[in-house]
Image (tube, grey):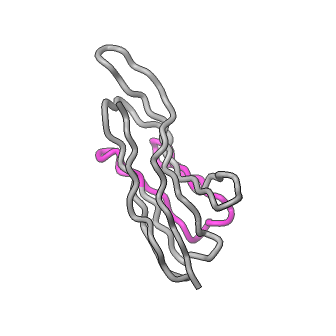
């Protein structure tokens, strides 16, 4: 069974910084793309940033220059460094990963989500 566990959310003043972490665990053979999404109240979930296994990154226009996504493949962990936080960054942030897992000699692909972590930027 594969799990994604997030940490690092919280309350911060606008202009401040937070770092989110998401660790994958379980019977993992390979992790492909990893990413962070967010969902604000009354809005659809949106992609914030993504990173491939090789390290290629992609960002939403609204966070470019402020957020940085990175990953440690040895630790099966993805990070999101968030600087210069704005009020509109307030949302629940979800980690996502495309993972090839195994059970015995059987391999299977899946799209996995973390439980979400609240990020609140206050004035």
Depth check: give the residue in front, 114 or 29.
114
Position of residue 95 relative to residue 64, above or below, is above
Give the number of marks. 0
Q: Residue 12: where, in percent of width, then height?
A: 48, 78
Question: Which quadrant does the N terminus fall into?
Answer: top left
Q: Residue furthest bottom?
A: 123
Describe residue 107's horizontal placement relative to residue 118 as left or right.
left
Describe residue 65's horizontal placement relative to residue 8 as left or right.
right
**Residue 105 lies in quadrant:** top left
**The magenta stretch spans which residues?**
49-78
Question: Which quadrant does the C terminus fall into?
Answer: bottom right
Q: Residue 102: where, in percent of width, then height?
A: 35, 23
**Residue 59 lies in quadrant:** bottom right
Depth check: give the residue in front, 73 or 92.
92
What residue is at 40 percent from the left and 54 percent from the top?
Answer: 6
Q: Is residue 41 magenta?
A: no
Depth check: give the residue in front, 67 or 9.
9
Q: Residue furthest front?
A: 42
What residue is at 35 percent from the left and 50 percent from the top?
Answer: 72
Q: Residue 32: where, in percent of width, then height?
A: 47, 37
Position of residue 96 relative to residue 84, above or below, is above
């Amino acid at each position: 069974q594969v799990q994604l566990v997030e940490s690092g959310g919280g309350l911060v003043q606008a202009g401040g910084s937070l770092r989110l972490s998401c660790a994958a665990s379980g019977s993992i053979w390979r992790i492909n793309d990893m990413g962070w999404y967010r969902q604000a109240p009354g809005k659809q979930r949106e992609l914030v940033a993504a990173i491939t296994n090789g390290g290629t990154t992609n960002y939403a226009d609204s966070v470019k220059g402020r957020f940085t996504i990175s990953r440690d493949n040895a630790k099966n962990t993805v990070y999101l460094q968030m600087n210069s936080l704005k009020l509109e960054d307030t949302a629940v942030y979800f980690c996502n990963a495309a993972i090839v897992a195994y059970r015995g000699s059987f391999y299977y692909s899946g799209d996995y989500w973390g439980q979400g972590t609240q990020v609140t930027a206050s004035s």
